[in-house]
Structures are given as C-alpha cells and as structure tokens.
Amino acid sequence: MGNKISKTPKKSISLPSTNTQEDSDFRYIEGRRYHNVENVKYPLPNDDEELDRLHQQHFLLRYVWQRNFGAPVKHILNQDGTKVLDVGCGAGSWIFEMASNYPNTQFTGLDISPIQPSEIKPKNVNFVIANVLNTLPFENDTFDYIFQRLLFIALPKDSWPVVINELTRVLKPGGYLELMEINPIPFQLGPVSSQLFIAVEKMLQLRDLDPQIPYKLRSYFEQQGNLENVTEEKNRLLFGPETGKLGQAAIENTRLGLFHAKPSLLEVIKISSEEYDNNLDIIAKELHEFDSYSDSYCVYARKK
Ligand SMILES: C[S@@+](CC[C@H](N)C(=O)[O-])C[C@H]1O[C@@H](n2cnc3c(N)ncnc32)[C@H](O)[C@@H]1O
C-alpha cells in the first residue's frame, strides 16, 4: 500500500467496542484512509469514495441474486427477538436494508473499522468493532442467523476454517450461517485485463489471501462437523453487452475497485500511475467486449 504513512501508529483494537471514531482507528496513505489494525491484510481504503463503492456493490449483488439472503430464515426474521450478525459489515449497506425490512429483529454489524453511521441508524441496529480473526466478543449460541459477505480480500487463506468454527460457536443450534463470496478474477478476459488480473491474483497471494475461496466454502462447511443441510448456490456477475445497464454498473464497480486498490497493485505491477489509470479505461472496454464474467457463490447451512 505504498509507504507514505502518516498519523498515529498502528494499534491493536480492544474488544468489544462500539463504532465511535477515533484518529487512531485509521491511517492515511497518499490522501486515502485505511484501517489501522495490525496483522489485518485488507488492502482497500475505507474512506467515503470506497464506502460509496461498497453501497453500489451491495445493490448490484442484490440485483444479480434477486435477494438479500439465501438461507431459509425469513420466518425467523419475522419473529420478535431474533438476533442477526453481519460479519465485516463495511458501510452497513446490507444491515440497514435488512433492519428496515425486519424491524422486530435485532441486527449487529461487526467490522474492524468504525466506518458505519453512528448517529443516524435504525433502532434495531448496533455495531461492534472487532476482528473476526480473534475470538468474537459474544457468548456461545448467541445469534439466530449469521451473514458474511466479500471477505476474500480480508481473511488469510488458512484462517477460513477457524473463522467458520468461531461463527458456528456464536450461532444458536438450529440457526443458519451464510457466506457469500466472489472470485475476484473474472473469466473471458481481454489482453490488458488478463495482465492486470494476474497482478490482482499475485497481490492477494502475497497477502496470503485466497481468490479461490468461493469454490472451497462448501467443503469447509461440510468439514466443520456442527453444520448440516449445507447448500451451495452459484451465480454470475456478467459484464458483457447482453446485460445492458447491469453490466455497465458491474464494470464501473470493478473499475472503481481496481482504482481504489491501485497502491497495492502498483507494488506488484511495475508501471506508472498514469499508465495504470489508462489501463483501467481499456479494461472497462475489454470486460464489455470480451463478455467477461465473475463467479459468485453463496453457501449456507444450519447449526446442529
Ligand atoms: C469488501 S468489504 C465488504 C463489506 C460488506 N460485507 C459488504 O458486502 O458490503 C470487507 C469489509 O470487511 C472488513 N474487514 C476486513 N478484515 C476484517 C476482519 N479481520 N474482521 C472484521 N472485519 C474485517 C473491512 O473493514 C470491510 O469493511
């Protein structure tokens, strides 16, 4: 992520805490704001530009999947006192929409950074600042439903089974765990896109992150031992001409993501910042022309 780090030194977060912002929660590199948690490999910034991108991505995924969740939990969400956890909740896009759809359910969003609105939020939402790589600040059997989306870019390769174990610990028996991931390397790429996505793969691997995680979730769930009725669903995020405005929105979101990841990617591909920006314009065209697509996987299961 470059080396022009300013502001306060890194700190370890104390658990649990609410999402009130302090200067030491962040570090700033070349004008962009990042998390400040030691040992967390998440390479994206968390400033307003990136939070806007996450919101757009949420609407995109909801459209692609035609839903906000796949697990059979609608009946639970309509009951008083149901507790839901959203892990790595980001800007809170999913949780805010769910909280307004299911006002009797209590939603908790968990993230390493206090980037969620703390003043204006529904009464049935609270946020906890914590690291999912540590023991979570919740008792055994706390939640009826746990949702986690797009942490391929945050969790080390070998940590997935451990995280799934920890999420299962805080899930009530009979409750559901649901993980949704995307393969960040699209298929059917043009020449410039191929080069850049090779760099994306390399950057993730250097950080010990796993772009292949969507394909491994089902077997991790099956191996956990305390999860049953494991269900895997697949979808595709299409960039080609036949998807019209949706494809254009997907391309724009991907282009923005690549722009926000520029500092980490320039560490891997040795080109100038200007050349990188030009390539992003070419990539946007190629994704459309080559009918590129990304795999999206959703896996859910019930705790025994
Ligand atoms: C790509 S964003 C996804 C946000 C949200 N799940 C969504 O789908 O819109 C990943 C989020 O995970 C958070 N994160 C990264 N590492 C984490 C960790 N170890 N524990 C908790 N949250 C983490 C980041 O701060 C970021 O908000």
Image (tube, grey):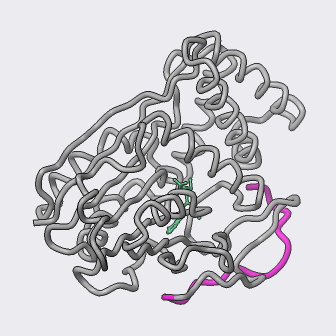
Which quarter of the picture shows residue 258?
Answer: top right
Q: In the rendered structure, does residue 9 fall within the stretch colored magenta?
A: yes
Question: Is residue 7 placed above or below 229 in the rendered structure?
Answer: below
> Where residue 76 sits: x, y (%)?
25, 65
Nearer the observer, 112 or 172: 172
Q: Position of residue 255 (x, y in %)?
A: 71, 34
Q: Residue at x 47, y 66 (%)?
A: 99
Seen at 43% across and 66% down, the residue is: 86
Q: Quadrant of residue 75?
A: bottom left
Name the residue at 41% across, 77% down.
Answer: 134
View quadrant of ligand 1:
bottom right
Up the image or down, 244 lies above or below 44; here it is: above
The residue stretch that appears in magenta: 1-16
Q: Nearer the viewer, residue 241 or 74?
A: 74
- Residue at 56%, 72% (x, y): give it: 112
Q: Return the residue nearer the eye: 17 or 122.
A: 122
Magenta: predominant secondary structure element?
A: loop
Q: Is residue 123 left or right of residue 47?
A: left
Q: Give the side of residue 154 with respect to residue 234, left or right.
A: right
Name the spot of residue 105 as percent of width and height, x first.
37, 72
Q: Report x, y in % for residue 270.
A: 77, 35
